[in-house]
Amino acid sequence: LETKTKDNVIVQIQVSVQYRIKPDAIYDAFYKLKDELQQITAYVLDLVRAEIPTMILDDVFEKKDRIADAVRQELTQTMQE
């Protein structure tokens, strides 16, 4: 992923996501989602692109946990729907 920070530095970020399907939602995951991997990827990339421009370059490295938490919270909420 390539994006720009608040201080106008272009950074390339590698994003890895681990996910699991809840046992009680297997039917929904299989039959209600067209391509779950593509949908999750799109959400994650959008969330990271939204989060990084609010930080300066130094903060991107220091606050990677904040980025991960923002992605986790938003993705959990979105995928539950």
Image: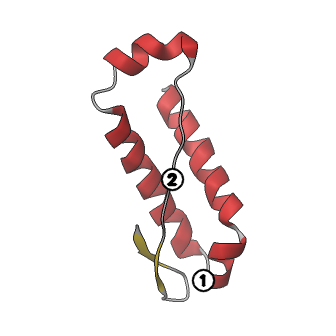
First in residue order: circle 1 vs circle 2: 2
Q: Nearer the viewer, mark 1 or mark 2?
A: 2
Q: Which mark is residue 57?
A: 1
Looking at the picture, tell me which residue is in the foreground, 19 or 4.
19
- Please state the horizontal and vertical placement of residue 69, each as a whole percent of the image: 66, 51
Picture residue at 52% right of the left edge, 80% below the top: 5
Q: Residues within 10 Å of mark 1 (few under 14, many from 20)?
A: some
- Please state the horizontal and vertical placement of residue 19, each as a whole percent of the image: 53, 36
What's the residue type where badge 2 is placed? Ser
Question: Which color scheme does this rendered protein use?
Answer: secondary structure
Q: Which mark is residue 80?
A: none
As measured in the structure, the alpha-carbon distance from the residue carrying label 1 to the one carrying label 2 is 20 Å
What's the residue type where badge 1 is placed? Leu
Picture residue at 63% right of the left edge, 54% below the top: 68
Q: Is residue 25 above or below residue 21?
A: above
Q: Report which quarter residue 6 is drawn in.
A: bottom right
Picture residue at 52% right of the left edge, 47% below the top: 17
Q: Is residue 43 above or below residue 61?
A: above
> Could you tell me which secondary element the residue under label 1 belongs to?
helix
Q: Is residue 29 above or below residue 44?
A: above
- Would residue 47 be found to the left or right of residue 69 on screen? left
- Would residue 9 be found to the left or right of residue 1 on screen? right
Q: Which mark is residue 16?
A: 2
> Could you tell me which secondary element the residue under label 2 belongs to?
loop
Picture residue at 55% right of the left edge, 11% below the top: 24
Looking at the picture, tell me which residue is in the foreground, 33 or 16.
16
Q: Is residue 11 above or below residue 74?
A: below
The N terminus lies in which quarter of the figure? bottom left
- Please state the horizontal and vertical placement of residue 13, each as a whole percent of the image: 48, 69
How many dots with numbers? 2
- Please state the horizontal and vertical placement of residue 51, each as a whole percent of the image: 55, 65
